[in-house]
Amino acid sequence: MAVTAGPGSGADLIEVFKALGNPARLQIMRWLKDPDTHFREYEPIADRQSVGVCVTHIQAKSGLAQSTVSSYMSTLERAGLVRPTRVGKWTHFRRDEERLEQVARAISTTI
């Protein structure tokens, strides 16, 4: 059976499932859903709603190594689930809500 490419395709959904199949990455996505609540103990470098959460804050909250968090965020970005924004020397991440809605629709129509 061939798996087609493109948004909402089987191959696309497999990448999303792989990205979310890791408990730590799934937890990060949950935290990013409500960044003001989950990261309130960290002084924001930029507006969390429009720019996202600084990767150093994600690293501090998760307790994971910086290299691990960077790798995890790259995986989520490749799956299209988060968007990075540079603010000075810091990279911030926020969820791509439009993409997540696309994935939800694809799951409901495909599976």
Image (cartoon, helix red, strand yellow):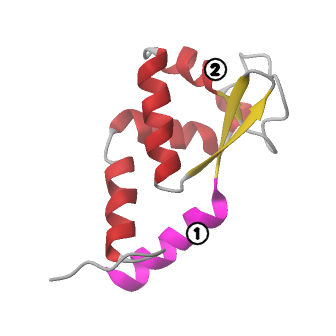
Looking at the rendered structure, the kind of residue marked 1 is: Glu
Residue at 43% from the left image edge and 17% from the top image edge: 64
Left or right: 30 in relation to 2: right
Asked if residue 111 is positioned above or below residue 25 in the image, the reply reads below
Dots 2 and 1: beta carbons under 8 Å? Answer: no
> What segment is highlighted magenta in the picture?
96-111
Asked where in the image residue 2 lies, by quadrant, the reply is bottom left
Asked if residue 50 is positioned above or below residue 89 in the image, the reply reads below
Left or right: 82 in relation to 18: right
Residue 89 or residue 92, whichever sits in front:
89
Residue 109 within the magenta-colored segment of the rendering: yes
Looking at the rendered structure, the kind of residue marked 2 is: His
Residue at 32% from the left image edge and 80% from the top image edge: 4
Residue 76 or residue 41, whichever sits in front:
76
| Mark 1 burial class by Cα count in 10 Å: few <14, some 14-19, many 20+ | few
Residue 44 within the magenta-colored segment of the rendering: no
Instruction: Determine the secondary structure under disc 2.
Output: helix
Q: State which quarter of the image contains the N terminus.
A: bottom left
Q: Which mark is residue 101?
A: 1
Residue 66 position in % (x across, y down): 49, 17
Residue at 58% from the left image edge and 36% from the top image edge: 31
The main secondary structure of the magenta stretch is: helix
Left or right: 79 in relation to 58: left
Q: Which residue matches tag 2?
A: 57
Residue at 82% from the left image edge and 22% from the top image edge: 45
Instruction: Determine the secondary structure under disc 1.
Output: helix
Lower position in the chain sequence, tag 2 or tag 1: 2
Residue 23 position in % (x across, y down): 35, 37
